[in-house]
Image (tube, helix red, strand yellow):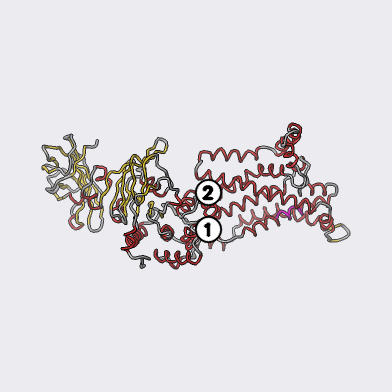
Amino acid sequence: MTLTAPQPKAAAVDTAATVEFRGLRRAFGDTVALDGLDLAVRPGELLALLGPSGCGKTTALRMLAGFEHPDSGEVLVDGEDVTRVPAHRRDAGMVFQSYSLFPHLSALDNVAFGLRMRKVRTGERRARAAELLELVGLADKGERYPHQLSGGQQQRIALARALALRPRVLLLDEPLSALDAKVRLTLREEIRRLQQELGITTLFVTHDQEEALSMADRVAVMRSGRLEQCAGPAELYGRPATAFVAEFVGTMSRIPGTLVDGGVEVLGRRLPVDGDAPSVSEVDVLVRPEAVAVRADDASDARVVATAFLGATTRLTVRLADGTEVKADLPARETAALGAGAAVSVSLPERPVLVAERRH
Amino acid sequence: MARLTGRGFGKVRPGRGVVLLCAAVYFLLPLAASVIFTVDVPGQGVNFDVYEQILGAEGFVSSLLLSLELAAATIALVLLLMVPAMVALRLGARRLRPVVEIVCALPLVLPPIAFVAGIATVLKWGPEYFSTTPLFQTFVAVQNPDFPVVLVLAYTVMALPFVYRALDAGLRSIDVPTLVEAARNCGAGWAQALVRAVLPNLRGALLNASFLTLALVLGEFTVAQILKFRPFAVWIVGIGGSEAQMSVAVSVLSLFVTWLLLLAIAAAGGRTPSPTTTEK
């Protein structure tokens, strides 16, 4: 499947729009969906809005599309306040979570729907729609009706439809969540490639952190209607700003430790603290599975309680003497002798570690 | 799966056959007997004199036309009332749904005779009470025997339960909010979104609602008779009253007229690609 952009990338990036949310607030009855969201999207970037369900990410996206209105705050596109602009004049193409193609129209007519609303002439309309179908690799499926297409194909058509009016912003509301795993992976790559070729500013809502980290230029992690952290995937993973981000993005184990003048005592050694330390002395040290070292040690009280083969690595779950469970990723060949029940010792590398207030 | 269904078709299932046979006997036997009774005149063999008499009788065309006009007006009115209301229920006012459902079911529990008694009282009382106001003319106009608007209004109420069910089933099969949002996202205003994205997918439901309303209006007797109008059902009872063969012939005829009209609606609605997507 080859994807060809209808316009050169450089030209597209020049015209790409910025998007800005300023102090967005929205409550549905007692539930606060957005609690003062501030976020700026750079021209041409793919920004993922990531968070648990109910964190307000979809509400934020729908506000940009014009389907929700903030109680207070502003939505700006290219510096222009669009908060009061009705949805059908927003100039933002959206792909929905559920299959949203018009069941009574063929794939081609679905893509051409927006052009028809804009009163584009039939010939031009069909040509443009065909071009877009080719862009999403479904040039031969134009005459099919939605119920004759697979889920992945339907979402591609929806993507083509969203792009048909050459919108300034592309909005993706969990477009892959209804698809099966394999289709999700290929479509993920395709959306990213298409977005980069077109250079269109894109907001992508997802609750799947792997999806967000692998596709986005930057990821905005949201929690209870607020922005927790907005950063590139590597920074988000390596230097999470809060304990919530640390645990939501990737896998994190908590190991109890004690703060002692600038360092933290954990697993029998003292390590420097990365970032600000909490004011209490009883803390948890947050560690990624790949940072934990495990070796067989008959003298230790720690036991392997579970192993999960992941291909190149095996994830061990180790229960320490005090009952804490720690996850560790080891190269698969090193774990042959470490079955469930094996006595092991766990250690951390001599590196600064993240700490958070102890959770009870 | 394919093999399973294949076996289902290949193998005769006695249970189904018996049920089908019973149903066929129950429905078709009286019908066939009626037809034979009307065409087989003792001593003269088979002839269609009775039907010729009916078709030639005074009032056949005019009463049938009146019924068709009433049906068309009722269908238009009830759909104009219910389609926007039910789409609105899906889009915003979800909490009102049980209220609307109950209101629409009321005509089922209300006997037509009670309903028409109320209407008759109002029609009698109204012109006297409003005799000096322009409303007097309104009361006269709705009872115009050439086109009794009051019957359209009554039939609209009586059709509500059926139209509600038909539309509800249709709306259930599509995701109205998402379709409207998708259309609006493509630059369609509210009205365009409804007409271009929602209504075409309700074609089956609209057709069913029209079907049921047509059947109701063609067969309705009580209200029309008591208000002294003469649509098809009233006419047919009037003409068949005295003679046995004639009265059976009119009921057979009215059955076929209704069937023909329903077939006509079905044909007009077409059976192009099913709008309900089942593969989701």
Does residue B125 lie above or below A12 as drawn? above
Q: Amino acid at mark 2?
A: Arg
* Chain under disc 2: B
B198 or A302: nearer the viewer: B198
Q: Amino acid at mark 1?
A: His
Where in the figure is residue B45, as x and y percent of width and height? 85, 61
Q: Residue at x 36, y 65 (%)?
A: A7
Q: Residues within 10 Å of mark 1 (few under 14, many from 20)?
A: many
Residue B1 visible to the viewer: no
Q: Looking at the rendering, in which quadrant would you find the C terminus of chain A?
A: top left
Question: Disc 1 marks which residue?
Answer: A104
A330 or A163: nearer the viewer: A163
A19 or A292: nearer the viewer: A19
* Chain under disc 1: A
Q: What segment carries the magenta color?
A: B252-259
Where in the figure is residue A278, as x and y percent of width and height? 19, 37
The label number, if any, that marks residue B172 in the structure image:
2
Q: Is residue B104 left or right of residue A207?
A: right
Q: Looking at the rendering, in which quadrant would you find the N terminus of chain A?
A: bottom left
Q: Is residue B115 left or right of residue A24?
A: right
B179 or B57: nearer the viewer: B179
Where in the figure is residue A186, as x and y percent of width and height? 34, 61
Q: Is residue B221 left or right of residue A161?
A: right
Q: Residue at x 21, y 42 (%)?
A: A254
Residue B228 lies in quadrant:
top right
Mark pair 1, 2: CA separation: 16 Å
Outermost residue toward the top?
Answer: B129
